[in-house]
């Protein structure tokens, strides 16, 4: 059932993305370096807030080599205002690793990308699929929410087994002809349509395949027990 359900959303999702993809600076010339920097900046930061920082960062440090050699004071000045400065330090440490262990060439396999400092499964999947067309699914809160609603699945998305289940599902069924567009379509769907509160089901391209919508449970999914406990405190 799951495979059939996900396969049915691919065509309408990609058609919608083709017509409605967000215009984002890091989507222009989506090299591994640009995708990487944008994904690290976007962690716990709004898209609109990241745009000017990304442009300034790319102007000052357009390559891995320049990032690796940048004085820390200058690097942190470029990052000033984004917060979570460990992200910037991890970026530079990873850049030095690329310089020293990969001859200055950004690694091109999921496993090698994942080995870099500060890069987790989601970021490694994003870089792999967008820059190198490797069929690795991006599974974050947005994607977990979308899948939970499509399947009317009340599994707790705070649990690792739920995340691993959907990671395996997405990796298996990702649109292998264009994994970049598939993953970015899911990103955009979660950010603009299948929102945490007030999902815009009337204009959702995959609403007809959403089992939660059929039983009017889209507003109560996903289940995130860790988040609920935090809110009750």
Image (spheres, rainbow, N blue to C red):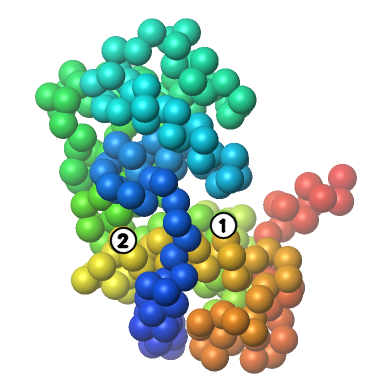
User: Which quadrant would the N terminus be assigned to in this image?
Assistant: bottom left
Q: Quadrant of residue 63?
A: top left
Name the residue that disc number 2 marks.
180
- The dot on residue 184 is none
C-alpha span from label 1 to label 2: 18 Å
Task: Identify the residue at image location x=59%, y=40%.
Answer: 49
> Is 126 on the left-hand or right-hand side of 50?
left
Residue placed furthest toward the left: 103
Mark 1 Cα shell of 10 Å, populated few (<14), some (14-19), many (≥20): some
Q: Is residue 173 visible?
A: yes
Task: Identify the residue at image location x=64%, y=84%.
Answer: 202
Ranked by sequence position, the earlier of labels 1 and 2 is 1
Name the residue that disc number 1 marks.
141
Mark 2 Cα shell of 10 Å, populated few (<14), some (14-19), many (≥20): many
Q: Is residue 18 above or below residue 111?
A: below
Residue 93 location (% of width, % of height): 35, 20
């Amino acid at each position: 059932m799951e495979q059939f359900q996900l396969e049915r959303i691919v065509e309408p999702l990609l058609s919608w993305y083709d017509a409605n993809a967000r215009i984002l600076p890091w989507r222009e010339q989506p090299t591994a370096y640009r995708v990487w920097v944008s994904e690290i900046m976007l962690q716990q930061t709004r898209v609109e807030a990241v745009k000017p920082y990304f442009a300034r960062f790319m102007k000052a440090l357009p390559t891995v080599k320049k990032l690796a050699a940048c004085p820390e004071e200058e690097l942190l000045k470029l990052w000033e205002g984004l917060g979570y400065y460990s992200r910037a330090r991890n970026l530079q440490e990873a850049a030095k690793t690329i310089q020293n262990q990969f001859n200055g060439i950004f690694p091109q396999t999921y496993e090698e990308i994942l080995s870099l400092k500060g890069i987790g499964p989601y970021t490694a999947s994003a870089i792999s699929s967008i820059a190198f067309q490797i069929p690795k699914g991006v599974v974050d809160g947005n994607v977990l929410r979308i899948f939970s609603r499509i399947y009317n699945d009340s599994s707790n998305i705070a649990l690792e087994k739920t995340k691993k289940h959907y990671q395996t599902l997405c990796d298996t069924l990702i649109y292998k002809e264009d994994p970049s567009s598939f993953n970015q379509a899911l990103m955009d769907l979660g950010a603009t349509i299948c929102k945490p509160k007030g999902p815009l089901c009337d204009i959702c391209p995959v609403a007809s395949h959403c089992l939660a919508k059929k039983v009017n449970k889209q507003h109560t999914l996903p289940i995130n027990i860790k988040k609920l406990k935090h809110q009750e405190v």
